[in-house]
Image (cartoon, rainbow, N blue to C red):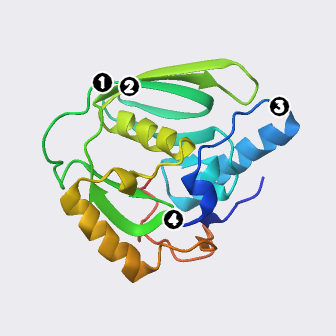
């Protein structure tokens, strides 16, 4: 296994729809193993293939599902997601904020569906499915969005979108070619091992 650099907002692979996986072989299994390793070292809870520069419909996750009181770890390849209606109103900055490994050091509030069902296959082509709620549903939506070429900052409401645009300019997150290396570069979120971003 090897750890991959995580590309940053502005890299073209993050902003286009990922391609379906058609070959379930050792190369794919190695990629998935690398993604798990990269996720662990990054202190994240989810990681999509485009975030390591690979435009394929794959994401991995490893996080506590607080509603179900279990730890969940797995992969979705070529996923389909169905969510409940996104609630109306403004997001709560205390309970509805997100961060992203490809938007280092920033987080913003965003409304998400409270319940989702997601179905796909694993690295061996076996069907996998989850029905989840709350924070874990947020993780699934966030990672699924990556495969559509959408980052959470692309969905922000006007107030937070303006703040994002100012931060984007200040941080230089508008040009390709930027990345950071988990386990080598400083953790952009300043996490210890008990906290994480997706």
Q: Earlier in the sequence, mark 4 or mark 3?
A: 4
Give the image quarter of residue 119.
top right
Relative placement, left or right, of 132 versus 150 is: left
Between marks 2 and 4, how big is the CA–CA gap? Answer: 26 Å
To which residue does mark 2 refer?
116
Q: Are marks 2 and 4 in contact (CB under 8 Å)?
A: no
Q: Which mark is residue 9?
A: 4
Residue drawn at (34%, 50%), measured in percent from left and top?
A: 155
The image shows residue 18 at horizontal and vertical percentages of: 64, 43
**Quarter-wise, where is residue 154 in the image?**
bottom left
Secondary structure category for the residue under label 3: loop
Instruction: Tell us which disc is closer to us: 2 or 1.
Output: 1
Q: Residue furthest right?
A: 26
Task: Look at the numbered disc 1 and give the secondary structure of its residue.
Answer: loop
- Marked residue nearer the N-terminal end (3 or 1): 3
* Front in this rendered view, residue 74 or 175: 175
> Dot 3, how many residues are within 10 Å of its Cα: few (below 14), some (14-19), or many (20+)?
few
Locate residue 126, reporting x and y percent. Answer: 70, 18
Up the image or down, 84 lies above or below 160; here it is above
Marks 1/4: CA distance?
28 Å
Name which of mark 2 and mark 3 comes first in the sequence. 3
Q: Can residue 185 be seen in the rendering of this structure?
A: yes
Q: Earlier in the sequence, mark 2 or mark 4?
A: 4
Look at 58% across and 76% down and name the residue there.
185
**Res 196 → quadrant:** bottom left
Q: Are marks 2 and 1 in contact (CB under 8 Å)?
A: yes
Q: Kindly report the distance in space between the C-alpha atoms of the residues bearing marks 4 and 3.
A: 28 Å
Residue 23 image label: 3
The residue indicated by pointer 1 is: 84
Contact between marks 1 and 4 (CB within 8 A): the answer is no
Is the residue 66 above or below the residue 37 in the image?
above
């Amino acid at each position: 296994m090897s750890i991959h650099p995580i590309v940053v907002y502005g890299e073209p692979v993050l902003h286009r729809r990922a391609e379906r996986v058609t070959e379930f072989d050792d190369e794919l299994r190695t990629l998935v193993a690398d993604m798990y390793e990269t996720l662990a070292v990054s202190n994240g809870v989810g990681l999509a293939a485009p975030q390591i520069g690979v435009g394929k419909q794959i994401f991995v996750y490893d996080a506590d599902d607080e509603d179900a009181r279990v730890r969940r770890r797995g992969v979705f390849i070529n996923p389909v997601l169905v969510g409940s209606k996104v609630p109306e109103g403004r997001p709560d900055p205390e309970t509805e904020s997100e961060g992203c490994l490809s938007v280092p050091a920033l987080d913003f509030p965003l409304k998400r569906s409270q319940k989702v069902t997601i179905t796909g296959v694993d690295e061996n082509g076996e069907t996998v499915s989850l029905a989840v709620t709350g924070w874990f549903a947020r993780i699934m939506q966030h990672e699924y969005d990556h495969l559509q070429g959408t980052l959470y900052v692309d969905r922000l409401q006007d107030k937070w979108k303006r703040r994002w645009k100012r931060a984007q300019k200040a941080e230089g997150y508008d040009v390709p070619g930027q990345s950071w290396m988990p386990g080598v570069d400083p953790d952009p979120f300043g996490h210890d091992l008990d906290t994480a971003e997706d």
